[in-house]
Amino acid sequence: MADRLLTVQQVAERLGTGVRFARRLIEERRIEYVKVGRHVRISERAVDAYVTANTVRPALRRLRSVA
């Protein structure tokens, strides 16, 4: 099954951000994209990879030992 290509608007909706942020990701080359003529498209896989790469895991808290 082929990976679906999303518009900038669709990427912004999927990330829960504005279009301006999605365009900045493209401009700064922080997300992989495809040029289709003069149009820019982003694969679903690239959006998932961006989210995974920028996910911050919670730190494990160490219990203080009672001395």
Image (cartoon, rainbow, N blue to C red):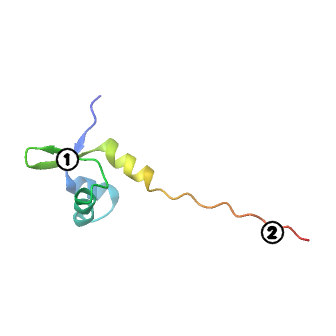
Is disc 2 surrounded by few (<14), some (14 to 19) or many (20+) residues within 10 Å?
few
Mark 1 and mark 2 in contact? Answer it, CB < 8 Å: no
Q: Amino acid at mark 2?
A: Arg
First along the sequence among labels 1 and 2: 1
Q: Position of residue 11 (x, y in %)?
A: 27, 54
Is disc 1 surrounded by few (<14), some (14 to 19) or many (20+) residues within 10 Å?
many
Q: Position of residue 65 (x, y in %)?
A: 85, 67
In the picture as drawn, the residue positioned furthest to the front comes out as 28
Q: CA distance from mark 1 to mark 2?
A: 50 Å
Residue 15 vertical position relative to residue 39 in the rendered view, above or below: below
Residue 16 vertical position relative to residue 66 in the rendered view, above or below: above
Q: Secondary structure at mark 2?
A: loop
Give me the disc on residue 64: 2
Apparent side of residue 9 relative to residue 64 in the rendered image (left or right): left
In the picture as drawn, the residue positioned furthest to the top comes out as 1
Q: Position of residue 30 (x, y in %)?
A: 31, 55
Q: Residue at x 62, y 61 (%)?
A: 59
Give me the disc on residue 14: none
Apparent side of residue 54 relative to residue 29 in the rendered image (left or right): right
Q: Residue at x 78, y 65 (%)?
A: 63
Residue 11 vertical position relative to residue 44 in the rendered view, above or below: below
Q: Nearer the viewer, residue 48 or 65?
A: 65
Q: Position of residue 43 (x, y in %)?
A: 27, 43
Apparent side of residue 34 relative to residue 48 in the rendered image (left or right): left
Apparent side of residue 60 relative to residue 16 in the rendered image (left or right): right
Q: Amino acid at mark 1?
A: Arg
Instruction: Report the residue marked by disc 1.
Output: 41
